[in-house]
Amino acid sequence: MIDSSLRALSDKLAAREISSVELTRAYLARIDAHNAAVNAYITVDPEASLAQAEAADKRIAKGEAQPLTGIPIAHKDIWCARDWRTTCGSRMLENFRAPYDAHVIQRFNDSGAVNLGKTNMDEFAMGSSNETSWFGPVRNPWDQQRVPGGSSGGSAAAVAAAMAPAATGTDTGGSIRQPASLCGISGLKPTYGLVSRYGMIAFASSLDQGGPLARSAEDLALLLDVMVGFDPRDSTSLERPEEDYSRMLDAPLSGLRIGLPREYFSEGISDEVRAAVETAIGEYRKLGATTVEVGLPASELSVPAYYVIAPAEASSNLSRYDGVRYGFRAEEYTDLLDMYCKTRAQGFGAEVKRRILIGTYVLSHGYYDAYYLKAQKIRRLIARDFAQAFEQCDVIMSPTSPSTAFGIGDRTTDPVQMYLSDIFTIAANLAGLPGMSIPCGIDSAGLPIGLQLIGNYFSEARMLNAAHLFQTNTDWHTRKSPVAAS
Amino acid sequence: MLARIEITEAESQQTLEQLSGVFGLIEKMQAIDTTDVAPMAHAQDVVARLRPDAVTESDQKELFQSVAPAVEDGLYLVPRVIE
């Protein structure tokens, strides 16, 4: 049961071979057994989950089930879920109970899915290793001395440890794809604007996008069907005709043109990552795809531009945490200003404070043109590079991350080193393009390697098709972490 | 100060070093000429939607104030501002 795909679980539920209560209990038992070691979840609420499971069983009995009815899904603790503690990995929201549901949570609830719990994450999604969480680091189920990646590290680890069949995440600069890569699972960041940001705690609003993490592309498609949808409460939500993201899964790959950006295969990639990615591309050629070298020269500046734009937007978004309307308030202070300063000094962790300081500085009078405006111009150049590349190809492939999972504590003292681990993922966020990571190898230390796919706007179904056929012809996505096997 | 975050003397040296490192990275942007490039604020060229000027939200003041650090008689409490 624990090894089944979402489709198989859905079929078993529909055939009444298993009940949602049994399935939910099985996953709760795995969380109970392994969360102390992995720390993938911040909050589990068996009573609430089982109540939803009972309701799902009744719905199935009445013949009113949808594909995900009765299936437990873990949610990154960035999504507000009514009456659930919603912390965003921060002391600032340690005791915050959301008074409403995010659009994505509402859509999962409407589909009859079960909320299995809220997963650990880098504080306010700022991090690439899940080490900035107020609730402690998440441990990679493949090697518990290593990071799972971030910021959706808890979601990726939960799936990789078989503590959830699937999970939601968010991706501002690689936060779905990089942890999916480091944990040996599949993850997709949709085109910006497809998944509503309503009720998703904001980090950098022009880059933030929710998406699914699961074991296979086939599972991602089912999750995407639920997550994507117009929402008037998000000013950047796109109104588009409804899509069935599974419709093209088995379409042949002959004629697929794969773009290989020379800048993404330069130095700085570990030899084993490069070899695995090249082997995967060889597999695609066998499946009938052709490859073409493309250039993304401005991508070299994606990390610098991102570390202006994202902190700038974050400094504005996070100004709401002032200790007045919700969240943490410092215990001792003299006046109102002192209350703000102490509340924010104690409520935020080091990385969040660093980004607020950077953001405040780059937006300040006299520096705006040199930093923020310059970064927005570079953003345009990056988007243009992609537009030109997509004249020659249908999908771009590269490593997701230059290395496999690094050790806990290895990069915490040098923020710049940490930032560079997102070097291949950030450009897709700046351009607003969909990006994916799927497993494509295991290195000599036994750690998973990820292949990144970047598609043109709204080409998710084709990307899922490309990923699915790779997964039909290889078995990397079926490899189990030691925790999942125990 | 604009960020409204207190930084102690002990923290300030390390903060300064780390921020200098990050700005070293950011400065690389200056290497590229961006004259005549229009800034890109957003991934999609969406125009702000308008909606009828009608009340759509219900009054949930009590629910929303139930998560506040300090509330009295429906008001948020903060330290005295005007003496």
Image (tube, coloured by chain):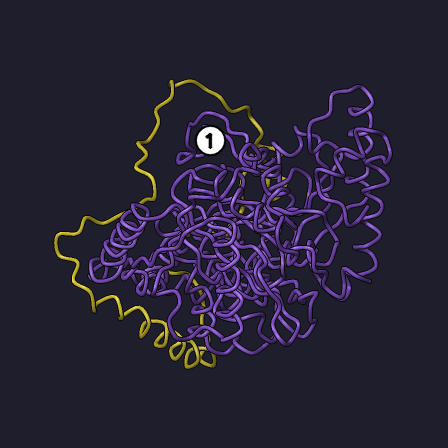
Determine whether the residue tagged by mark 1 lies in a helix, strand or loop: loop
Residue A455 placement, left or right of A411: left
Q: Report if residue B70 is visible in the image.
A: no
Q: Quadrant of the C terminus of chain A?
A: bottom right
For the point 23% across and 54% down, the residue is: A377
Q: Quadrant of the N terminus of chain A?
A: top right
Residue A69 placement, left or right of A371: right
Indicate whether A304 appears above or below A316: below
Percent across and percent down for residue A327 are 58, 51
The chain to which mark 1 is attached is A
Residue A151 placement, left or right of A75: left
Indicate whether A199 appears above or below B8: above
Q: Quadrant of residue A267?
A: bottom left
Q: Nearer the viewer, residue A211 or A214?
A: A214
Question: What shade has chain A been given?
Answer: purple
Q: Nearer the viewer, residue A359 or A163?
A: A163
Tell me the residue that label 1 is attached to: A233
Classify mark 1: residues with Cα within 10 Å, few (<14), some (14-19) or many (20+).
Answer: few
Percent across and percent down for residue A345 are 50, 65
Indicate whether A325 appears above or below A155: above
Q: Quadrant of residue B18?
A: bottom left
Percent across and percent down for residue A255 are 42, 44
Question: What shade has chain B been given?
Answer: yellow
Residue farthest to the left?
Answer: B36
Amino acid type at circle 1 is Arg
Q: Quadrant of residue A232?
A: top left
Q: Nearer the viewer, residue A447 or A212?
A: A447
For the point 66% across and 64% down, the residue is: A138
Residue B50 placement, left or right of A332: left
